[in-house]
Image: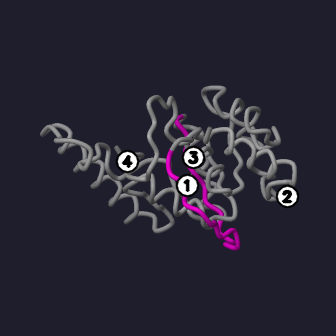
Amino acid sequence: RELLQHGTEVLYAPDLSLAAYNPGAIDLSADVVAWGDSVTKQIAAVLWQKSKDHGQLFMPTRSSVKYDPDCCELTIRQKMENVRYALKSKAATAIDSRMFVVKTGEEFYQKVSSLKLYITGRFHGACLAYLAGTPFVCVRSNTRKIEQLLIDAGLNPDRLVECGGLANVFERDWSYSDVETRNRELFLLDAEE
């Protein structure tokens, strides 16, 4: 339904983060680095600590709303789950002002598109950063999805680091190379077809 609102009809999309809307121009002049989370709690804790150590934004790939109330009629259980999510997010941002929790995928996209760099352990965070044209670094996670995205999209495999490699993450420029930029253009054109 959300895709139709943006003029995209999708009959089957195994991963909506690559099928969602295209925002147009992207401002990469920002000098903000954000750290994401991971499905692995230990890695998520390391990413949060690194964001804290560097005084940088922590932006987990999750929403303050679990179920979309605009999508359909929610059950009482789903409404209660939304309240729990909202309270949890509000508490997290009250405890740590560097935490940025979004309400929608579009809000996450807008924020990630303004970053200089996004460091995450989640596949969907990497996908949205890629769509936004924001350079990203991923921590190896519990599946090979991120590795496969790098291969499929023609990105430098060095963008995938072990958790211990985060100590040196700022020793290099993570901007997209000319080859990666061209591969991204081709990959996104191919995805539109």
Which residue is disc 3 drawn over? 125
Crowd class of label 4 (few under 14; some 14 to 19; many from 20; radius 10 Å): few
Label drawn at residue 22: 1
The answer to if 32 sits in the magenta stretch is yes
Which residue is disc 4 drawn over? 2
The percent coordinates of residue 47 (x first, y second) are 61, 49
Label drawn at residue 124: none
Alpha carbons under labels 2 and 3: distance apart: 22 Å
Alpha carbons under labels 1 and 4: distance apart: 13 Å
User: Could you tell me the amino acid type at mark 4?
Assistant: Glu
Residue lying farthest top? 143
Q: Residue at x 46, y 36 (%)?
A: 10
Q: In terms of sequence position, does the residue under pointer 1 or pointer 4 come before the other?
A: 4
* Dominant secondary structure (helix, strand or loop) of the stretch shown in magenta: loop
Q: In terms of sequence position, does the residue under pointer 2 or pointer 3 come before the other?
A: 3
Q: Residue at x 57, y 37 (%)?
A: 42
